[in-house]
Image (cartoon, rainbow, N blue to C red):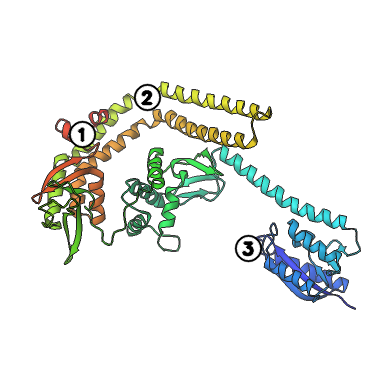
């Protein structure tokens, strides 16, 4: 009686743009082989899925056909097209030994129930071992890249893959949104959902033109890649790519993230809620929306306030707050002249602290020696592998952090002039604060106040007390028209 065969073709990837000819070429060659051998094919099965793990739906469908006695044999390109894992290998071999599968025909040879199972087992084991070796080699290659400071995967949002030079480059159009997300979250006043909304209004879009939701923002904040460190399997590596943010800013956001310093959900957004208190009783001022206007008033949490029924409307409050910025206002043309003068002086005094660098390198050498001693202790069977792994990971992470600090310190002598830029930004922020507050939307108003002011208190619908945050408070103590270098020394 003529046996009925299934023709099975498989390619490893599910992507349509890779191995696109693999299935077609397999089927063409196997049809020619079947015609030559006089094999009757009753069904052709094609599958685009890796065989390194059980669970292929088409393969499992074929196995059920054999168990039901609907077909007798398989024709495929090679045994490794059928299986590369021990679970499917055992299932296939069991059906063959029990005559459920009467023949497996490959392009090179055939397998029968009466054959010695050793040869088929060897071929299946070789296919399975190939997958294991491939995974090991890929992981080893990735570790080598990471240790050299190269990122082995696709660049995170805010960066681009330079495939020609095999480098990670900053995407200038997108990096600004990542920086903005870190700056907003580090204040502790914005949740991921609020940041997502702000960035969307400022132009951030996905590749398909959609919105970046809170989950995407969370991934930004939790990724040390943006401060120059690469994390893989719990281990940190120093990257060659350009950091988008400082390590200090990243650490600040992690403190906020892990301590869950997030604002309470609000039905309405009031730019100055949370920044002011009542001078009379010390309770916080809250806000409400009435007839399209914001009204601020004392919460009277202590039940003793006589002013909690006095409502301060936005068009009265905002000019009062705006007037505070007059105290630190500096002409922008003067800022530019001060900057150029300080830049020239700084270029003549460029340098960095050798003592700090020596201390960091000494600590790094100590850790290297400690790592070597830890390995000797393991080889001498004085500690377990688990203890060694935990201690080694701790040392490696500290070494990565120190290496990053050393690299930053060594670069200071060539980048010392860049320290003037933050100072210039402070001067410019002072000169623009009032205009940004007056002309900006509610989000911008909150950002300006949050950046510059704190401890605001209201009494009799007037500003009773206020303080400027550092470094803006320095402008109240400095002589008139302070210069850059004086401010930096403070």
Q: Nearer the viewer, residue 124 or 411?
A: 124
Between tags 1 and 2, which lies in front?
1
Between the C-alphas of marks 1 and 2, the distance is 26 Å
Q: Are marks 1 and 2 in contact (CB under 8 Å)?
A: no
Residue drawn where x is 48% and y is 31% of the image: 402
Between tags 3 and 1, which lies in front?
1
Between tags 3 and 2, which lies in front?
3
Q: Which mark is residue 351?
A: 2
Numbered disc 1: secondary structure: helix
Residue under numbered circle 1: 474
Mark toward the start of the polypeptide (3 vs 2): 3
Residue under numbered circle 3: 14
Mark toward the start of the polypeptide (1 vs 2): 2
Q: Nearer the viewer, residue 45 or 35?
A: 45
Q: Nearer the viewer, residue 77 or 350?
A: 77
Mark toward the start of the polypeptide (3 vs 1): 3
Residue 211 at what x, y percent from top left?
40, 61
Between the C-alphas of marks 3 and 2, the distance is 55 Å
The residue carrying pointer 1 sits among few (fewer than 14), some (14 to 19) or many (20 or more) residues within 10 Å by Cα, namely: some
Q: Nearer the viewer, residue 440 or 160?
A: 440
Which residue is the extreme one toward the bottom? Answer: 1
Q: Which mark is residue 222?
A: none
Q: Is residue 339 above or below residue 463?
A: above
Numbered disc 3: secondary structure: loop
Residue 303 at what x, y percent from top left?
16, 52
Q: Are marks 3 and 2 in contact (CB under 8 Å)?
A: no
Where the N terminus falls, by quadrant?
Answer: bottom right
* In this picture, residue 330 sits left or right of residue 40: left
Where the C terminus falls, by quadrant?
Answer: top left
């Amino acid at each position: 009686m003529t046996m009925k065969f299934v023709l099975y073709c498989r390619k490893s990837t599910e992507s349509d743009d890779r191995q696109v000819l693999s299935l077609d070429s397999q089927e063409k060659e196997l049809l020619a082989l079947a015609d030559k051998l006089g094999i009757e094919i009753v069904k052709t099965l094609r599958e685009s899925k890796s065989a390194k793990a059980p669970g292929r739906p088409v393969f499992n469908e074929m196995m059920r056909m054999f168990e039901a006695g609907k077909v007798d044999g398989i024709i495929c390109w090679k045994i490794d097209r059928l299986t590369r894992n021990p679970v499917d290998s055992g299932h296939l071999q069991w059906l063959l030994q029990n005559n459920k599968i009467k023949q497996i025909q490959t392009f090179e040879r055939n397998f029968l129930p009466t054959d010695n199972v050793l040869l088929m087992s060897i071929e299946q084991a070789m296919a399975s071992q190939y997958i294991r070796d491939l995974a090991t080699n890929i992981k080893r290659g990735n570790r080598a890249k990471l240790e050299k400071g190269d990122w082995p995967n696709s660049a995170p949002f805010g960066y681009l893959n330079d495939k020609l030079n095999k480098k990670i480059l900053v995407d200038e159009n997108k990096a600004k949104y990542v920086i903005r997300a870190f700056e907003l979250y580090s204040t502790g006043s914005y949740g991921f959902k609020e940041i997502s909304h702000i960035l969307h209004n400022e132009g951030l879009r996905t590749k398909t033109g959609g919105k970046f939701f809170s989950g995407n923002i969370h991934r930004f904040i939790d990724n040390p890649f943006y401060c120059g460190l690469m994390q893989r399997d719990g281990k940190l590596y120093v990257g060659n790519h350009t950091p988008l943010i400082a390590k200090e800013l990243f650490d600040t956001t992690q403190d906020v993230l892990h301590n869950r310093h997030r604002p309470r959900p609000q039905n309405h957004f009031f730019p100055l809620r949370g920044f002011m208190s009542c001078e009379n009783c010390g309770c916080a001022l809250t806000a409400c929306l009435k007839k399209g206007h914001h009204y601020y008033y004392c919460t009277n949490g202590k039940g003793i306030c006589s002013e909690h029924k006095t409502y301060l409307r936005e068009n009265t409050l905002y000019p009062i707050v705006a007037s505070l910025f007059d105290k630190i206002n500096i002409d922008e043309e003067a800022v530019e002249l001060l900057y150029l003068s300080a830049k020239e002086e700084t270029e003549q005094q460029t340098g960095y602290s050798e003592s700090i660098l020596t201390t960091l390198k000494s600590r790094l050498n100590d850790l290297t020696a400690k790592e070597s001693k830890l390995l000797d202790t393991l080889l001498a069977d004085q500690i377990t592998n688990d203890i060694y792994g935990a201690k080694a990971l701790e040392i490696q992470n500290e070494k990565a952090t120190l290496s990053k600090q050393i690299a930053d310190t060594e670069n200071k002598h060539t980048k010392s002039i860049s320290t003037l830029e933050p100072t210039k930004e402070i001067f410019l922020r002072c000169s623009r604060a009032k205009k940004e507050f007056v002309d900006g939307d509610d989000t911008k108003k909150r950002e300006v106040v949050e950046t510059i002011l704190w401890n605001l208190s209201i009494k009799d619908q007037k500003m009773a007390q206020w303080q400027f945050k550092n470094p803006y408070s320095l402008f109240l103590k400095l002589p008139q028209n302070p210069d850059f270098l004086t401010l930096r020394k403070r």
